[in-house]
Image (tube, rainbow, N blue to C red):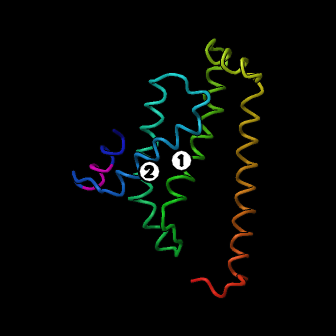
């Protein structure tokens, strides 16, 4: 829903195929980042719709800026998977903190051996660890591509 509404809004009532496809994928990506604590149907719909909206905004407004700066995201990995995965992961500690006293959240977390009070800091720490590993892996991959034994990669 969010994908179609936003795509039509930014494109004078027309849908852009790329925005629709990636917007739908983004809804699934953002909800997978917080699926462990988003237990209600209503919450899942809201967060998935938010992912679709964010995806279309990034594809229609921010991707052209990336291209002007010389950054190439040929498969929209950063705009689709990176941004929505990060936002989904950031929503999780917000939900846990906001619903810390909710019986459903307490039951869900304690049944898995997790404390509702300790889970938000653990989640935020995991996000920073993941970002650190991503940067190190990206730098290492770029370096290995630069000094490839197979010749110059174009």
The residue most toward the top is: 103
Above or below 17: residue 34:
above
Callout 1: SS: helix
Could you tell me which residue is drawn at 48 percent across and 61 percent down? 76
Callout 2: SS: helix
Could you tell me which residue is drawn at 59 percent across and 34 percent down? 34
Could you tell me which residue is drawn at 73 percent across and 18 percent down? 110
Dots 1, 2 in contact, CB < 8 A: yes
The tag on residue 76 is none
Where residue 55 sits: x, y (%)? 44, 50
Neighbour tally class for label 2: few under 14, some 14-19, many 20 plus, Cα within 10 Å: many
Above or below 140: residue 37:
above
**Residue designated by label 2:** 55
Could you tell me which residue is drawn at 64 percent across and 18 percent down? 105
Q: Is residue 147 left or right of residue 51?
A: right
**Residue designated by label 1:** 84
Near-viewer residue (76 or 149): 149
**Magenta span of residues:** 7-11
Where residue 140 sits: x, y (%)? 74, 69
Does the magenta stretch mainly form a helix, a strand or a loop?
helix
Where residue 111 sits: x, y (%)? 71, 17
Q: Is residue 8 magenta?
A: yes
The residue most toward the bottom is: 151
Name the N-terminal-most of marks 1 and 2. Answer: 2
Toward which corner of the image does residue 91 lie, by quadrant?
Answer: top right
Above or below 133: residue 94:
above
- Quadrant containing the N terminus is top left
Neighbour tally class for label 1: few under 14, some 14-19, many 20 plus, Cα within 10 Å: many
Where residue 136 sits: x, y (%)? 75, 62
């Amino acid at each position: 829903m969010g994908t179609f509404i936003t795509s039509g809004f930014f494109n004078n009532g027309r849908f852009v195929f790329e925005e629709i496809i990636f917007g739908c994928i983004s809804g699934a990506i953002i909800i997978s980042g917080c699926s462990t604590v988003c237990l209600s149907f209503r919450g899942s719909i809201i967060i998935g719709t938010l992912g679709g909206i964010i995806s279309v905004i990034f594809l229609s407004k921010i991707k052209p800026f990336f291209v002007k700066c010389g950054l190439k995201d040929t498969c929209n990995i950063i705009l689709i998977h990176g941004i929505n995965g990060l936002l989904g992961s950031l929503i999780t500690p917000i939900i846990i903190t906001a619903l810390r006293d909710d019986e459903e959240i307490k039951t869900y977390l304690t049944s898995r051996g997790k404390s509702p009070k300790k889970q938000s800091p653990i989640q935020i720490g995991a996000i920073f660890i993941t970002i650190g590993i991503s940067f190190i892996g990206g730098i290492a991959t770029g370096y290995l591509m630069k000094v490839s034994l197979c010749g110059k990669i174009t």
